[in-house]
Amino acid sequence: MAGILTYAVGDIHGSFTKLTNLWRHCLHHSAGKPHRFVFLGDYVDRGKRTKDVISFLIKAQAAAPEQVVCLMGNHEDLLLNAAKGDGMPLWLDNGGDATLRSYGVTTAAELPPEHVDWISALPLSLADEKRFYVHAGVEPGVPLKKQRRNALLWIREPFLSDKRDHGLFIVHGHTPQHSHLPHFLPNRLNIDTVAVLGGPLTAAVFDETTKGPLAFITDDGRITKAPKITELEDA
């Protein structure tokens, strides 16, 4: 997959229109070059159109499995627990009620089996030569291949405050950036720009020559050049 562009997309939370707009802008940006999408999880809950988001991702992945990677987020984890009959109140408290409404059902057990099966099969992370893509983050000091499931899906601290090199550059979401801007540090990038609460849905653009992002694209079509990691270290 030499020369491929990677579009890593932050938390969607049922924001279907923003997803389809961002998808279109990323395809235009790729200009026919080899590319892939890496979605960082949290497709469900809070927003109004979870069903449409999941249907879109399933269809896109089926059409181009090598080009569409979907990771699991903590909200998918909550949904799966609720579907198994465990943790329904916790899921509802975290926006699961919006997911139920989008499917027109009243309990997680009524969700379409094909959607639940797809969610249950989602991987927890993806690594390439320079980056480690994950929903929440990593446990500092633990090798990336030995990270615990709970950390990959749920961690905030001590990960967010840790400035060490984790072996690969970490690309994640999970922690809302209420500035509506990506949080770019020398060792990690957070692209949860709170699409479901009025912020943009953001994709970070990567190539295979540098570990940091080249640019950010938002669902309204804005493209912002990213600083170099060396510029962040010198700041």
Image (tube, rainbow, N blue to C red):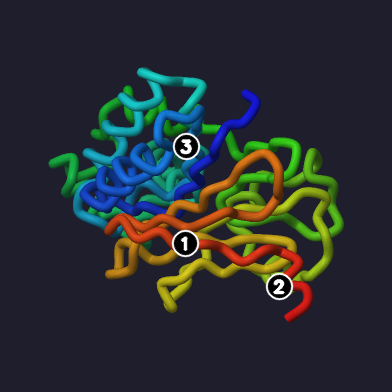
Q: Specify the amino acid type for callout 3.
A: Phe
As drawn, 22 above or below 55 = below
Residue in the foreground of this view, choosing between 155 and 5: 5
Residue appearing at x 22%, y 39% in the figure? 52
Residue appearing at x 33%, y 68% in the figure? 199
Q: What's the CA distance linking mark 1 and mark 3?
A: 16 Å
Q: Position of residue 148 (x, y in %)?
A: 72, 46
As drawn, 99 above or below 199 = above
Report which quarter residue 111 is drawn in. Answer: top left
On the image, numbered disc 3 is attached to which residue? 37
Which residue occupies the extreme bottom position in the image?
A: 235
Residue appearing at x 75%, y 37% in the figure? 129
On the image, numbered disc 1 is attached to which residue? 192
Q: Quadrant of the C terminus?
A: bottom right
Residue in the foreground of this view, choosing between 81 and 5: 5
Contact between labelled residues 3 and 2, with CB atoms less than 8 Å apart:
no
Left or right, 14 with respect to 179, comes to left
